[in-house]
Image: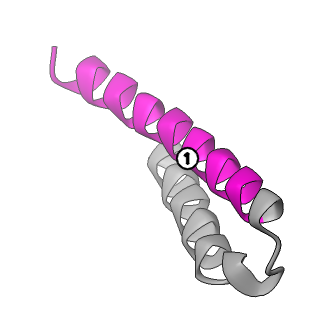
Amino acid sequence: MNEIDDIKKGVKKVSESLSHFMETGHLADNISHLTTSASTLRILAKKLDEIRNKNHP
């Protein structure tokens, strides 16, 4: 369950970060921020998929 809790915390961090990403006002910074957030969410989704496959083969 620790893995799932870690993933939940990761998703929460990305969510909080995305709620404030427009504060800089710089398009390049915002695009970089969105790209980083998308990459983080992709990694977290992959971990969830691995856990699901391990528990429900």
- Magenta stretch: helix, strand or loop mostly: helix
Q: Residues within 10 Å of mark 1 (few under 14, many from 20)?
A: few
**As rendered, which of 21 and 46 lies closer to the eye?**
21
In the rendered view, would you say 41 is above or below 15?
A: above
Point out the stretch of residues depicted in magenta. Answer: 30-57
User: At x 80% / y 57%, what residue is drawn?
Assistant: 28
**Which quadrant: the C terminus?**
top left
On the image, the x and y values in percent for residue 44 come to: 50, 41
On the image, the x and y values in percent for residue 23 come to: 77, 86
On the image, the x and y values in percent for residue 54 come to: 30, 19
In the rendered view, would you say 19 is above or below 12?
A: below
Numbered marks: total: 1
Q: Which secondary structure, mark 1?
A: helix
**As rendered, which of 31 and 4 lies closer to the eye?**
31
User: At x 60% / y 57%, what residue is drawn?
Assistant: 10
Does the magenta portion include 19?
Answer: no
Residue hosting label 1: 38
Farthest residue toward the left?
A: 56
User: At x 52% / y 50%, what residue is drawn?
Assistant: 7
Farthest residue toward the top?
A: 57
Left or right, residue 8 beside residue 23: left
Does the magenta portion include 36?
Answer: yes
On the image, the x and y values in percent for residue 50 come to: 37, 23
**As rendered, which of 33 and 48 lies closer to the eye?**
33
Amino acid beneath label 1 = Ala
User: At x 16% / y 23%, what residue is drawn?
Assistant: 56
